[in-house]
Image (tube, rainbow, N blue to C red):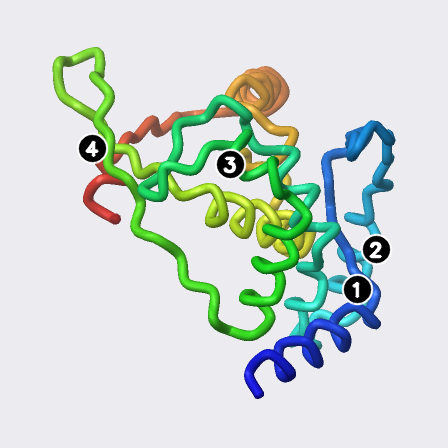
Amino acid sequence: MQEGLIAARTRASAQRPQICVPEPGVTLKVAGVGRRHAPVEGLLRAAVTRNRKERLTALLHHVGTDCLRWAFFNLKKRAAPGVDEVTWDQYAENLEANLADLHARVHAGTYRALPSRRKYIPKADGRQRPLGIAAIEDKIVQAAVVAILTPIYEAEFLGFSYGFRPGRRQHDALDALACGIRACKINWILDADIRSFLERAA
């Protein structure tokens, strides 16, 4: 019964158009075949800005096997494994079957993320910064969801926002600040840093 339900949901999901948002110009090679994905950020952004009173209520069907495959190939191949100890190469050995199983679990609601593996890296002041290393499938799902949500939230950000946004770096923020100081009358500048913010907010 459960297998039939999963199969039915998988077929229904496959019938819907799937949207995946890679970086512009990214070329994927699957089984020796280069596949170029055109960015659809403009389409999603248009859907968001067309009527800001409407809410997007159905996005899961965009997380299809193609999107999961794109997410997998955009992971760092030599990244440290999570608690499952599965590496990128090991997951790739049976990639299509693994992605099909992951897709079925995500759409059936049975997918559960594993705990992150804790690792500490030294900081310049002698303290240690905690890191959480996700399992390989969790990285895939996270990357796929980010690919779908990024163009939606990007439409809401203001132009002077630079933190953790695609195509924007801290040097871009400094350049914008320098330009603003030269072009506008600036009386004061506030530079603030919240100590151990990520550690305390986690």
* Other-residue count near label 4 (Cα within 10 Å), few / some / many at <14 / 14–19 / ≥20: few
Q: Indicate which disc, 2 or 3, sits on the residue closer to the N terminus.
A: 2
Residue behind mark 4 = 195
Cβ–Cβ below 8 Å for labels 2 and 4? no
Structural distance between the alpha carbons of marks 1 and 3? 23 Å
Q: Secondary structure at mark 3?
A: loop
Residue 162 x/y as whole percent: 54, 34
Q: Is residue 14 left or right of residue 90?
A: right
Residue 119 x/y as whole percent: 24, 30
Structural distance between the alpha carbons of marks 3 and 4? 18 Å
Residue behind mark 3 = 164
Q: Is residue 111 left or right of residue 33?
A: left
Name the quadrant containing residue 126.
top left
Structural distance between the alpha carbons of marks 2 and 3? 22 Å
Residue behind mark 2 = 43
Q: Indicate which disc, 4 or 1, sits on the residue closer to the N terminus.
A: 1
- Hey, what amino acid is under mark 3? Phe
Q: Quadrant of the N terminus?
A: bottom right
- Hey, what amino acid is under mark 1? Ala
Q: Nearer the viewer, residue 80 or 154?
A: 80
